[in-house]
Amino acid sequence: MITIIAAVAENNALGKNNQLIWHLPADLKRFKQVTLNHNVIMGRKTFESLGKPLPNRTNIVITRNNQYKAENCIVVNSLEEALKVSKNDENPYILGGAEIYSQAIKIADKLDLTFVHHTFNADAFFPEIDKSIWIESSRQDFKADDKNNYDYSFVSFIRK
């Protein structure tokens, strides 16, 4: 199973200037729980925005730069190569960014999304979810609170 995991705003916004636009501690906590002890696949810009490898996960960074080095990470040149490296993980997670999501949505088995119920000014966007291909399999809705500034939902989709 290949899972795309992302936090997406109402206008499909992902981020701006290589950063998340919002701060939702509940999403970060869930992200950590879900991806722990799995391979996490991400583009170079996403990796650099994190600043360091995610602990207790195998970090795989995709870049076209054959000279690129990332300490404590596996560096590959394509999504296909990243998935080959992940063959021993029954559920690797694709972390983005936008370009990687656009490639991965064509082959992923599951979308594990946090929908942030707000519209943001962004420069990176999640691809459209084609409802003829994806079916919603679970949803949990939450209201904003003292720690999370926006209403949000945890929604999973599986490929039909």
Image (cartoon, rainbow, N blue to C red):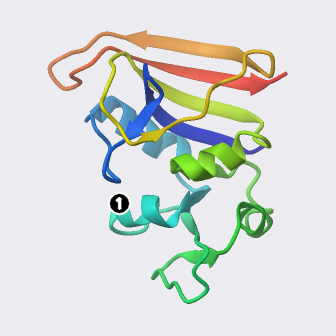
Q: In this view of the protein, which residue sits in the foreground, 28 or 22?
A: 22
Asked where in the image residue 18 lies, by quadrant, the reply is bottom left
Drawn side of residue 44 relative to residue 144, left or right:
right
Drawn side of residue 31 relative to residue 50, left or right:
right
**Residue at the left extreme of this rendering:** 146
Q: In this view of the protein, which residue sits in the foreground, 156 or 21?
A: 21
Which residue is disc 1 drawn over? 49
Q: Work out which quarter of the rendered image holds the N terminus and state it.
A: top right
Name the residue located 35 percent from the left edge and 60 percent from the top edge. 49
In the rendered image, residue 127, in percent from the top left (x then y), is placed at 60, 34
Q: In this view of the protein, which residue sits in the foreground, 50 or 43?
A: 43
**Residue at the right extreme of this rendering:** 160
Name the residue located 18 percent from the left edge and 26 percent from the top edge. 147
Asked where in the image residue 85 lies, by quadrant, the reply is bottom right
Question: Badge 1: how crowded within 10 Å, few (<14), some, or many (20+)?
Answer: few
- Position of residue 151 relative to residue 28, above or below, is above
Kind of residue at badge 1: Ser
Q: How many marks?
A: 1
Q: Work out which quarter of the rendered image holds the C terminus and state it.
A: top right
In the rendered image, residue 95, in percent from the top left (x then y), is placed at 54, 49
In the rendered image, residue 44, in percent from the top left (x then y), is placed at 49, 67
Q: Is residue 48 visible?
A: yes
Q: Is residue 55 visible?
A: no
Label 1 secondary element: helix
- Position of residue 149 relative to residue 47, above or below, is above
In the rendered image, residue 48, in percent from the top left (x then y), is placed at 38, 66
Drawn side of residue 41 relative to residue 28, left or right:
right
- Position of residue 86 relative to residue 138, above or below, is below
Name the residue located 23 percent from the left edge and 24 percent from the top edge. 148
